[in-house]
Image: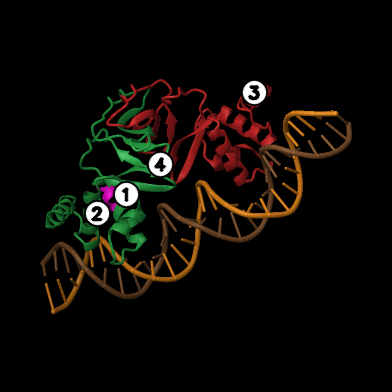
Chain colours: A green, B red, C brown, D orange
Amino acid sequence: MADLDIKAAEMLKVANLYRTKHRVTIVKVLLKAGRPLSQEQIAHRCGKKHFDKVTIYRIIETLVKVGLVHKAYVDKRASHFELAHHCTDRQCHPHFTCTSCGSTHCLMEISLPMAESPHKGFIIKRQKVHLEGLCPDCV
Amino acid sequence: MADLDIKAAEMLKVANLYRTKHRVTIVKVLLKAGRPLSQEQIAHRCGKKHFDKVTIYRIIETLVKVGLVHKAYVDKRASHFELAHHCTDRQCHPHFTCTSCGSTHCLMEISLPMAESPHKGFIIKRQKVHLEGLCPDCV
DNA sequence: AGCAAATATGCAACTAAGTTGCAAATAATT
DNA sequence: AATTATTTGCAACTTAGTTGCATATTTGCT
C-alpha cells in the first residue's frame, strides 16, 4: 500500500502539518476504510503498534481543524470521523442508519438541494443529512 | 400554567403511560421550551424539587419509545431532546448550529424534499437535517 | 376510600468517551 | 549535528449515560 502512504503524506503536506508516523497511519486507515470510524475503530485498524487514544483524539482534532476530516455522526455516544475529500464545502453525502440492525452506511450518490440562505438572518454555510430506515440486509 | 398541565397529562394519556408528577413536569418543561434540551437543562428547569438524573433519562427513554419525543442532536457530548408533535413521521424541522457562538436553533419554516426511497436497497423512512453557519447575532 | 398489582423513582456504584498537564520523543530547520 | 518546534505517552481526571435493587407512586378494582 505504498500508494496510500504517498497519498496520506501528500495530504498532510498540503495541509502544512508535520508528517509523523502516527498521522500518516491514521490518514491511511481513514482512506482505506472509506467510511466514518470511531477512535476505537481507528485504534484497532492501526494494528499492533501502540497508538494511545489521546494521540488518536489529538490527531483527529488536528485533521478536523485543517478540514481534512469531519465528524460524520455520533453513534452510541461515540463520534465517527471520515475524510472530507469527497465532500463539497457545502454538504457531504448523507449517512444512513438502519433502525433494525444499527449499522450505518454512506449513501454517496444521494444529494439533497441546499436549504436556501440567508433564512431569517441565519447564514447557512453547510448542511448535514442523516437518514434512517432499513438497510438491504434487514428489508 | 394549568393549560400546560392539562396538555401534558393528555399527551401521556394518549400514549397510554402512567401520569406521574415527574413525567407531567418534564413534558411541560419540553412544551414550554419549544426547543431541544439536554438532561441537565431539563433538570434545571424542573426547579428546586429533586429530579434524579436517572429518572430523567428513563422518562426521556420512555417518551422516545412511544414517539412523543426524539433526539434532535448531540452537542458537546450531550444529547438534546424535543417533543415530536410538530414533526411529520418522515422528517422534522432542521436544526441550526452557529459555528461562531455555538448556539443551536430550530428553523421551523425550512423543509427539504425527502431523499427518494428505496435507494439501492435502502428503505429510507426518516430524514434529519442539521445546518451550520452564522446566527443573526454573530453575522 | 382501601387494597393489590403494575409501574416509576432514588440511590449508589458503575461504564466508557473524551480531556488535561507534563515529561519524553520525534520532526523540521539551521 | 544541534537547536527549535511540535507531537506523543502516561496517568489521572471529567462527565454523559447505565444498571440493579429497594422503596414509593399510580392505576384498576371492589
Distance (Cα) linking label 3 and label 4: 33 Å
Labels 3 and 2 in the same subunit: no
Residue C13 x/y as whole percent: 61, 61
Write down the region rendered in magenta.
Answer: A62-66
Residue bearing the label numbered 4: A102
Residue bearing the label numbered 1: A37
Q: Is residue B127 left or right of residue B69?
A: left
Report crowding for label 2: few under 14, some 14 to 19, many 20 or more residues within 10 A (C-alpha): many
Residue A3 x/y as whole percent: 12, 54
- At 35% from the left and 51% from the top, the residue drawn is A38
Mark 2: amino acid: Val
Distance (Cα) linking label 3 and label 2: 52 Å
Main secondary structure type of the part rendered in magenta: helix
Q: Find out whether residue A65 is within the magenta segment.
A: yes
Residue bearing the label numbered 2: A29
| Among the 4 quarters of the image, the one containing residue B90 | top left
Q: Disc 3 is attached to a residue of which chain?
A: B
Q: Disc 2 is attached to a residue of which chain?
A: A
Residue A112 x/y as whole percent: 28, 26
Labels 1 and 2 in the same subunit: yes
Labels 2 and 4 in the same subunit: yes
Report crowding for label 4: few under 14, some 14 to 19, many 20 or more residues within 10 A (C-alpha): some
Nearest the camera: A139 or B51?
A: A139
